[in-house]
Image (cartoon, coloured by chain):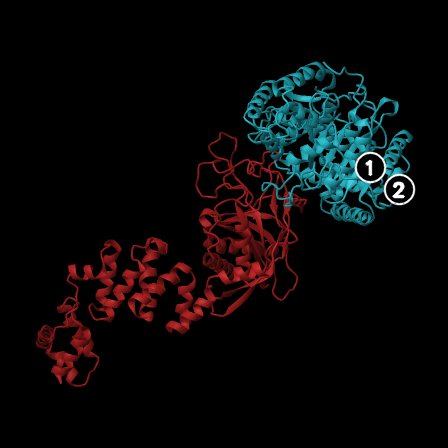
Amino acid sequence: MIEKTVAELSAALAAGEISSVELTQAYLDRIAHYNKTLNAYITVCNDSALAQAKAADAARAKGDTSPLLGIPLAHKDIFCTTGVRTTCGSRMLNNFIAPYDATVVERFNAAGAVMLGKTNMDEFAMGSSNETSYFGPVRNPWDTEKVPGGSSGGSAAAVAADLCAMATGTDTGGSIRQPAAFCGITGFKPSYGRVSRWGMIAFASSLDQAGPICKSAEDAALMMNVMAGLDEKDSTSIDLPVEDYTATLNDSLEGLRIGIPRQHFAEGLSPEVEQSIRDGLAVFEKLGATIKEIDLPNNHLSVSAYYVVAPAEASANLSRYDGVRYGYRCEDPVDLEDMYKRTRSEGFGAEVKRRIMVGTYALSAGFYDAYYRKAQRIRRLIKNDFSSAFKEVDVIIGPTSPHTAFGLGAKSDPVAMYLEDIYTIAVNLAGLPGMSIPAGLPGGMPTGMHIVGNDFAEAKLLNVAHQFQLNTDWHTRRPAALGKEA
Amino acid sequence: MEWETVIGLEVHVQLSTKSKLFSGSSTKFGAEPNTQANIYDLALPGTLPVLNKEVVKKAVMFGLAIGAEIGKRSIFDRKNYFYPDLPKGYQTSQLDFPTVGKGTLTIMLEDGSEKVVGVTRAHIEEDAGKSLHEDFHGMSGIDLNRAGTPLLEIVSEPDLRNAKEAVAYLKKLHSIIRYLDISDAIMAQGSMRCDANVSIRPKGESKFGTRTEIKNINSFRFVEKAINYEVQRQQDVIEDGGSVVQETRLYDADRDETRSMRSKEVENDYRYFPEPDLLPIEIDDSYIEALREQLPELPEAKKERFMSQYGLSDYDAGVLVVEREMADYFEAVAKTGGDAKMAANWVSVELQGLLNKEDWEIGECPIQADRLGTLIARIKDNTISGKIAKTVFETMVEDPAGVDEIIESKGLKQVTDTGAIEALVDEVIANNPDQVQQLRDGKEQVIGYLVGQAMKLSQGKANPGQVNQLLRDKIK
């Protein structure tokens, strides 16, 4: 049962084939068995999960038919959860228990979903391999010597290893899509403003966006139906009506115009990933889509611009971790400056400190124009590239990552790590929706197909991905390294 | 050498909204520490700001009152620095696109002439909390009740040329803010705070000298004293062959001096950048026009009206309109009393004297406008004389009873009975034969003495006009 999609589980629960308590217990058992190996969860909520499951079963008995009622999920440990600690993968928040729920958490709770626990992640979502977590790296269920990608690596690994039915993630530069690609699952990053950021710990406020990590496009649609919508508590959330994302999943792709960016099929892309994407494109052609090469001429500037904007915002967002009110504080500070310095030196890991320094530098007097202002200009150029492209095509498709998952410890050079997100970052800079779906298994490791849509074209993306999944079975493959049942 | 002083003021005004700039916490003054700080004010992770639109409204009203350009698209920025009472590690403020742009304020100088002072800008920002350094045994306590309270920072051009002008500017600003009712603007409570940028230069020089910024000035009087001290200090430094260091200085009211706060350290780099958690504030013309309609009558317009409607002098009208409450009080007195000039006189002399003596605000004064108005009405209808009225006025401070009741119970009613006055006059004539003769000889001023004697006999209650008339009748 635990390998099933949310849509299937929802039907099984509705049909009374299984109770939420049974389902929840099955996932908890599997977590108990495999989490030692995978390190996907930082916190597991055995008791509260079972209590929620019981409540869900009771609600169902009373006639509640909410689609996600009783479905066990995992939240990335970046979402604040009342009474359950929220670490953001950092020593700084090792002891932090929020007295509030993130809006995303609140919405899943209201939908009756069951929270199994909080998943591991790169510290403050800064990383592409999940190796920067204070709680140790997450391992890829397809090959435990490889990384699951990051920063939502715990959520991706948990979904891939059936340690939950679905999970939440956040994506600032590719943090949902790249781990989804590495773990062979479906990851969806909505348009900026579509999902509330309230209660989601900020990395780079103008880029961060929460989204589903799950087993199919249909599941992503079900999750988006819960997650999306205006939130008065997030001033950047958008006041646009929320569609029923499942309603258009079955629309025909006849006449769909697909753009493939020349720049995403260039040097650096591994041949086996390229092949899997080209094979996938052939599937779309059979479904009646037309394929056209397009130009994203400023794409090569996206990583540089991102690594100015994101660290700059992060440098301010992370200033609140000062040891004064909550979180880590160094032992026996002699004075205020000593407390600041040691708290932040000891509480943050190397990558976080690197980015705070980069961001601080980029905003400094005399450098602001050369870095931050210029990066913002590039951001507009990138947005314009996409706007022109979407005059000619409906969706843009390419690889999510240049290659399949790499080995733990294989990328020690920060810049090499930053280049991991070369295809995904521009989407965040432009605020567009993007997703990654499984497209192949060369050498036994998953590849991800990256689908990008125009502003608020969530439904179109999900439709395209769902049609692909109806005609392929990559998304149903599970890592052989782990048994199907615990 | 003759020196010229150049002063610019940065005034922080706490806008009087019920809740904070970006959170729903109360802004009430004087609550127990940290009882008015919610999860946003504490900067807990994941919390986000939501703009309080009342703040924008109040800022725009101020802008309209000083004839300023209103920013159609104002943008919040983060101003980054670490301090324990700044929970987020940055202050949300406005740098390049403030809500209120260039405007002007007209002040009256001592010689009666007017001076137009430029206002560079007024931007919205959040206040910090308070660090408490006493009572914590070498440690510091943090109170975040004030953190996030909305401020309007009003920056003047360096147009002020001496301490008195600075005070006049500040008082005018205070007056307008109180008229608009956008802030309590109480300097002693910190709801209005003033930093002064002061420099000097040789008279005739067009280049500015090096300025210092004086902080911690918490009364109008201290503004004058602090600036005068600082001007003298800078003059002494330069005349002794030294040069002024650009720095922040703290005013110490106890010692009446300014002290260097930060040494020659490099200025803080605040690394401003646009606040990504907030959208720009978009303001359209209809919003501006709707607020313009709501603007109250401002001091200058009120003064003009007082002069034309009540025939008050420029000076009297000017004094009465400084505070909105005082102007309202005056108008109520004039209405009840039926004589605007007498009302103006009583309000600006007797009443103001009482307020000064007791250190009362007009709202605290036990003589309400309707009572003072009635008192004036009783002078007008000859129930009491102006002199007796002063006695009644004094009684009214202690006695909350009605004016008529007081006059009645104290037996102060003016004697207008002709028979009674005739008896008084006869007695005076009998007792003062020499003076009576002098009057007969044409020494007119003696009449005053004789009337005075009659008033004395009546214990002030006789109608002086009647006494005068009768004396003349009898002596001729």
Q: Earlier in the sequence, mark 2 or mark 1?
A: 2
**Chain letter, disc 2 residue:** A
Residue identifier under label 1? A422
Would residue B411 appear left or right of B164 to someone viewing this image?
left
Q: Vertically, is A228 above or below A47?
A: below
Task: Choose top left, top right, bottom left or bottom right for residue A324.
Answer: top right
> Which quadrant of the view contains residue B455?
bottom left
Quadrant for the C terminus of chain B, please: bottom left
The hue used for chain B is red
Q: Which mark is residue B149?
A: none
Q: Would you identify the image quadrant in which residue B239 lies?
A: bottom right
Chain that the image shows in cyan: A
Give the residue pinned by disc 2: A262
Residue B94 appears left or right of A434: left
Left or right of A69, for residue B18: left
- Residue type marked 1: Ile
- The span from disc 2 to disc 1 (Cα, nearest Å) is 13 Å
Q: Amino acid at mark 2?
A: Arg
Rendering coords of residue A89 (x, y %):
68, 26
Q: Residue at x 31, y 69 (%)?
A: B342
* Frontmost residue, A285 versus B11: A285
Disc 1: host chain: A
Residue at x-position 66% and y-position 36%: A225
In this view, the mark in front (2 or 1): 2
Image coords of residue B166 (percent x, y): 52, 59
Q: Is residue A352 visible?
A: no
Secondary structure state at the residue bearing disc 2: helix
